[in-house]
Image (spheres, grey):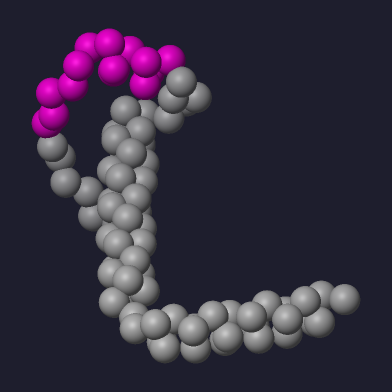
């Protein structure tokens, strides 16, 4: 993976805390891991919001049908794990 050099300003206390728990990782590795985790968390929250909007927009009939399918899937899964 191609790397880009960046310069960031970080609170000294936060940086010391990171250095203490880095377990041999370089600061660059710590920042990469933190950025990767932050981006994954953002995507996860976005996906959860999309799912919530979808289910909130369902009519009562659609909600009932979804509930029936969920029950069917749950029962089928229970039968396969016996």
Taking depth in this image into account, of 3 and 64 the one nearest to the observer is: 64
Q: Quadrant of residue 78?
A: bottom right
Quadrant where the C terminus is found in the figure: bottom right
Q: Which residues are magenta?
A: 7-20
Query: Residue drawn at (30%, 45%), measured in percent from left and top?
Result: 38
> Is 28 rendered above or below residue 13?
below
The image position of residue 69, as x and y in percent, is 57, 86
Residue 62 drawn at (x, y percent): 41, 87
| Image spot of residue 80 (x, y percent) | 80, 81
Q: Position of residue 70 (x, y in %)?
A: 58, 80
* Rendered position, 69 above or below 57: below
Dominant secondary structure (helix, strand or loop) of the stretch shown in magenta: helix
Tell me where residue 28 sits by quadrant.
Answer: top left
Which residue: 54% across, 80% down? 67
- Judge whether residue 32 is colored magenta: no
Residue 36 visible to the viewer = no
The residue lying toward the viewer, choosing from 77 and 59, is 59
State which quarter of the image contains the N terminus.
bottom left
Residue displayed at 58% across by 86% down: 68
Q: How many marks?
A: 0
User: Is 35 drawn above or below residue 54 in the view shown?
Assistant: above
Would residue 2 be seen by someone viewing this image from the given angle?
Answer: yes
């Amino acid at each position: 993976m191609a790397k880009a050099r960046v310069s960031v300003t970080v609170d000294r206390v936060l940086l010391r805390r990171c250095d203490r728990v880095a377990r041999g990782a370089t600061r660059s590795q710590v920042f990469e891991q933190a950025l990767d985790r932050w981006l994954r968390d953002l995507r996860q929250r976005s996906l959860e919001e999309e799912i919530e909007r979808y289910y909130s927009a369902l009519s009562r009939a659609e909600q009932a049908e979804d509930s029936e399918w969920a029950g069917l899937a749950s029962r089928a899964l229970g039968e396969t794990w016996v």
